[in-house]
Image: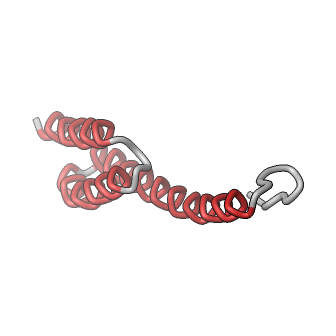
Amino acid sequence: MPYYPGHMAITKNAKKAHRASLKKHVFNVRRKRALTDTVKVVKKAIGTDVKEAEKSLAAAYKAIDKAAKGGVIKKNAASRKKSRLAKAIGRAKA
């Protein structure tokens, strides 16, 4: 997202806040992409190899927790995602 001086922030503080939000946006997008990628890996592995899914579950938990800590997703959403992944692996085992 480019910075448009004439269309958005007027005050010096608002311009600085907008620059900061653009930097935070990059981190949030990166964190969310890591989250979705790891969850996809686990879901794909559930269909093929349950042992591999269990191994990649730890990485998915880590990505989910980091996303929740950074405010990319809410705490309950993170808990729900983790619970559903674990439940899906449990169903695939049985």
Residue appearing at x 28%, y 36% in the figure = 76
Residue appearing at x 28%, y 61% in the figure = 59
Where in the figure is residue 69, as x and y percent of width and height? 33, 55
- Name the image colouring: secondary structure
Q: Quadrant of residue 4?
A: bottom right
Q: Is residue 41 left or right of 82 when viewed as pictured?
A: right
Where in the figure is residue 15, as x and y percent of width and height? 72, 61
Q: Quadrant of residue 16?
A: bottom right
Residue appearing at x 22%, y 59% in the figure = 58
Q: Is residue 10 left or right of 80 when viewed as pictured?
A: right
Q: How many marks?
A: 0
Whether residue 22 is situated above or below residue 80 in the rendered picture? below
Quadrant into which the C terminus falls: top left
Camera-nearest residue between 81 and 88: 81
Camera-nearest residue between 53 and 19: 19
Residue furthest out toward the right? 6
Q: Is residue 8 left or right of 32 when viewed as pictured?
A: right
Camera-nearest residue between 7 and 93: 7
Whether residue 24 is situated above or below residue 49 in the rendered picture? below
Residue appearing at x 18%, y 36% in the figure = 87
Quadrant into which the N terminus falls: bottom right
Where in the figure is residue 62, as x and y percent of width and height? 27, 59
Where in the figure is residue 22, as x and y percent of width and height? 64, 61
Residue furthest out toward the left? 94
